[in-house]
């Protein structure tokens, strides 16, 4: 029997090392093959990312401000056209204060946010333009909506940062809160048998703060019409001019005192020169601080009216001065269901109580259904104080062209309508292309 000796220790170690290396290579190839197989397997699509949380539906009622412009940079907000689907109702109003313009923002929660209400205020500096006002209101709008977003899944994507503290600085206004306006217009039209010219001009100055208000204005109008028919020619003119002023001092949160004056001339009313001086006092049932939401004002005026007439009147007067008084009640409401503005005014002369005038005007807008509003404008007067009517009467042309005031015991106007908006509630894109302030900038006529 022959005995064969075994391999040395070095040979056994080399065999084990090669065995481990081959095992690692095979395991790596197997893992890579499985990965390629999954990547190339037909019909297998990686799962989509989770959808983003739904935006907060908000209805914004902001007269004078564009809701889309207010929210175009707020990715977590989607404006809706009506209050029914909205989770939050926002009402933005403005009023002049000592530091410029104050914006009041009212937040009312609906659906899952019922009872979650809030109010915020923002202000723009004196003399600030529309952009500054939009920025101030937009910042407070963002802050007010955060408390609602915090109760939704959107809060997971919300980050709040505190800006560096800025040292307060005194407000500097070189105009001292005065605002001036100057305008002039001319209108010309005509055909082969008729031509018309109209000229308008006005100037105003006002200084409005929370404690004091001053308003001054002056203006005039001139209209000329010329008719050239084969067997008839007629020319007519009508002019008027005025200067008026108002000064009001606040006496607290309910009372105000002040007065106004008017100096005017009107060919239509047969008044060559009219002067009215009317001191006044006013009481608001609600605090003036709530004037952006509700007002019930009672205004009492008493004063002197002096007239000089172009023509002798039906009462055989060419001039006269009379004392009189007026009482006016005004109700204004701004609510989520709509707005109401109604005013009732009564005036009479002291020398003859049968010479009076009673006037009622109203403007109502009610939200009936989602996107559907009912609008009503109207007014009327009971007139028994026409002291300036000319004794000589009016010609046929003056009546037809309304060149002279005519005797009447009433006047009225009335408008009623419905407005309905519908469509997507998911569009909050601002796109000003091909737009103009007067509507479409492209006009096709057939």
Image (tube, rainbow, N blue to C red):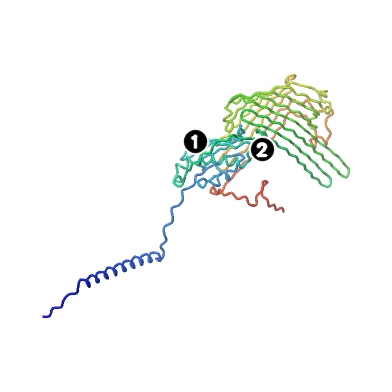
Residue identified by numbered label 1: 117
Q: Is residue 155 above or below residue 6?
A: above
As rendered, which of 433 and 294 lies closer to the eye?
433
Single out the residue that lies furthest toward the right.
Answer: 231
Single out the residue that lies furthest toward the left.
Answer: 1
Residue 144 — which label? none
Residue identified by numbered label 2: 415
- Rendering coords of residue 83 (x, y %): 54, 41
Residue 30, located in which quarter of the rendered image? bottom left
Name the image quarter holding the N terminus: bottom left
As rendered, which of 354 and 276 lies closer to the eye?
276
- Rendering coords of residue 382 (x, y %): 71, 28
As rendered, which of 395 and 388 lies closer to the eye?
388
In the image: residue 356, left or right of residue 370:
right
Residue 361, located in which quarter of the rendered image? top right
Mark 2 crowdedness (10 Å alpha carbons): few <14, some 14-19, many ≥20? few
- Rendering coords of residue 304 (x, y %): 74, 22
In the image: residue 8, left or right of residue 434:
left
Residue shown at 81% from the left, 29% from the top: 272
């Amino acid at each position: 029997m022959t005995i064969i000796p075994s391999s040395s220790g070095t040979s056994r170690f080399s065999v084990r090392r090669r065995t481990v290396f081959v095992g690692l290579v095979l395991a790596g190839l197997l893992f890579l093959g499985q990965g390629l197989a999954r990547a190339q397997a037909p019909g297998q699509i990686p799962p989509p990312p989770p959808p983003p949380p739904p935006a907060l539906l908000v209805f914004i009622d902001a007269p004078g401000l564009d809701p889309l412009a207010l929210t175009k940079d707020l990715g977590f907000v989607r404006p809706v056209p009506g209050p029914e689907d909205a989770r939050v109702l926002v009402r933005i109003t403005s009023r002049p204060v000592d530091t410029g313009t104050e914006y009041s923002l009212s937040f009312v929660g609906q659906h899952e946010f019922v009872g979650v209400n809030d109010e915020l205020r923002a202000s723009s500096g004196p003399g600030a333009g529309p952009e500054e006002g939009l920025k101030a209101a937009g910042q407070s709008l963002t802050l007010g909506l955060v408390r609602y977003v915090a109760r939704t899944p959107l809060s997971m994507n919300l980050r709040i940062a505190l800006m560096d503290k800025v040292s307060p600085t005194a407000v500097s206004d070189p105009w001292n809160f005065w605002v001036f306006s100057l305008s002039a217009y001319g209108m010309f039209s005509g055909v082969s048998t008729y031509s018309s010219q109209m000229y308008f001009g006005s100037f105003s100055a006002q200084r409005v703060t929370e404690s004091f208000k001053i308003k001054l204005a002056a203006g005039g109008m001139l209209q000329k019409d010329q008719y050239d028919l084969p067997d008839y020619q007629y020319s007519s003119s009508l002019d008027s001019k005025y200067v008026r002023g108002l000064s009001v001092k606040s006496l607290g949160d309910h009372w105000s005192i002040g007065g106004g004056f008017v100096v005017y001339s009107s060919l239509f009313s047969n008044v060559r020169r009219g002067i009215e001086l009317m001191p006044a006092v006013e009481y608001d049932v609600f605090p003036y601080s709530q004037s952006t939401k509700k007002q019930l004002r009672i205004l009492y005026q008493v004063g002197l009216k002096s007239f000089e007439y172009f023509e002798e009147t039906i009462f055989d007067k060419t001039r006269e001065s009379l004392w009189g008084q007026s009482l006016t009640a005004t109700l204004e409401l701004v609510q989520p269901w709509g707005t109401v503005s109604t005013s009732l005014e009564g005036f009479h002369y002291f020398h003859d109580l049968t010479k009076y005038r009673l006037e009622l005007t109203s403007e109502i807008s009610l939200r009936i259904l989602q996107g559907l509003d009912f609008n009503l404008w109207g007014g009327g007067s009971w007139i028994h104080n026409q002291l300036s009517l000319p004794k000589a009467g009016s010609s046929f042309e003056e009546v037809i062209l309304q060149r002279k005031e005519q005797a009447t015991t009433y006047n009225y106007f009335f408008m009623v309508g419905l407005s309905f908006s519908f469509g997507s509630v998911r569009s909050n894109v601002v796109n000003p292309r091909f737009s103009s302030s007067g509507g479409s900038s492209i006009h096709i006529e057939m």
